[in-house]
Amino acid sequence: MEFFIAPFEVSFVLRALIAGALAAVLCACVGTWVVLRGLAFFGDAMSHGMLPGVAIASLLGGNLMVGAAVSALVMSAGVVWTSREAKLSQDVSIGLQFIGMLALGVVIVSHSNTFAVDLTGFLFGDVLGVQRQDVLIIGVAALATVLACWGLHRPFMALAFDEQKATTLGLRPRWAHLAMLALTALATVASFQIVGTLLVFGLLIGPPATGLLLFRDPRSIMLGAAILGVLQVYAGLLVSWYAQTAAGATIALLSAATFFAALLVKRIAHRVRYVKANENHSH
């Protein structure tokens, strides 16, 4: 038993566990709708599009999360405006914003000779460096997201499965879509300090995608994703402690591995049922 709890007797590892668990719950709530709506590309673009704000905040000595939030808001607004004004598909609009924001971030970083360490932290996260104020911010973001997903469950559900019906029912799908983009941005901003922008997908996409393999009801997917995410954070920190690996990357790797393991098990179970059904039919 000591093996499983010893690392978390260290204060900074315990803070990492609490922050990671809160981020997992936050990403499970938002990620469920991201997966159901097919907005994974937006989440990916958002995680990279935060680079200019983070770079500027770092160079000016400001708060990285505030810089990330400003970039996320600019990018979200840009996606909506470009889609509407240029009559382009959302994927094209997201791609254009993605390219522009990432390129701007790289240009800003290229002018700084002292940004390498901070950039590494931005890309890959520093879950073991989380401070108490970070835990508080993530906790507030998680609570706000849970309440928002609960309050907007009906319009989100209608939007995910039948946008035309959502319009007929007066659920304002455009506003629901904007709210979903905003929550995705919030989840990305709040989580990037835990696993970094390149690995934030580990929590935002992995657990909800695995939950979708196991359940069909969005609430069940959300709950399953939250539980899986928390377990993956715990296991990732445990493995990284003993194996001396990067904590954020280990968490994200476990998230992806869990999905493919669940997919493989489901495929094998389906095959076994198919064989048994054929055997019973032949008899």
Image: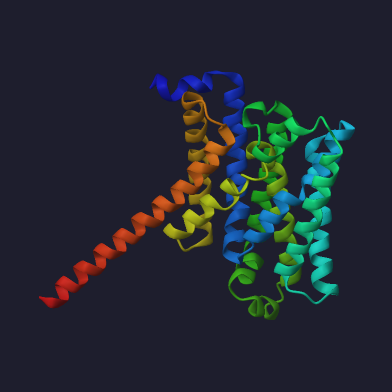
Relative to 281, say whether 240 is above or below: above
Pick the front one: 183 or 47: 47
Image position of 84 (left or right of 4): right
Q: Is residue 272 above or below residue 146?
A: below
In the rendered structure, the answer to whether residue 92 lies left or right of residue 278 reads right
Question: Residue at 87% across / 30% down in the picture?
Answer: 61
Query: Would you say residue 227 is visible in this rendering?
Result: no
Q: Height in image: 271 above or below 195?
A: below
Q: Classify residue 170 by image quadrant.
A: bottom right
> In the drawing, does residue 258 fall left or right of residue 187?
left
At 87% from the left and 34% from the top, the residue drawn is: 59
Which residue appears farthest toward the right when viewing the image? 60
Percent position (x, y) of residue 178?
Answer: 75, 63
**Residue closer to the observer: 50 or 228:** 50
**Residue 116 picture quarter:** top right
The residue lying at 46 percent from left, 23 percent from top is 5
Of the 4 image quadrants, the one containing the C terminus is bottom left
The colour style of the image is: rainbow
* Percent coordinates x, y for residue 158 in the rendering: 62, 71
Give the number of callouts: 0
Please state if 29 lies on the left or on the right of 176 as rendered: left
- Residue 216 is situated, as x and y percent measured from the top left of the image, at 46, 63
Q: Does residue 60 appear anywhere in the picture?
A: yes
Q: Quadrant of the N terminus?
A: top left
* Image x and y of residue 245, in percent: 53, 30
The residue sitting at 71% across, 38% down in the picture is 122
> 242 and 115: which one is in front?
115
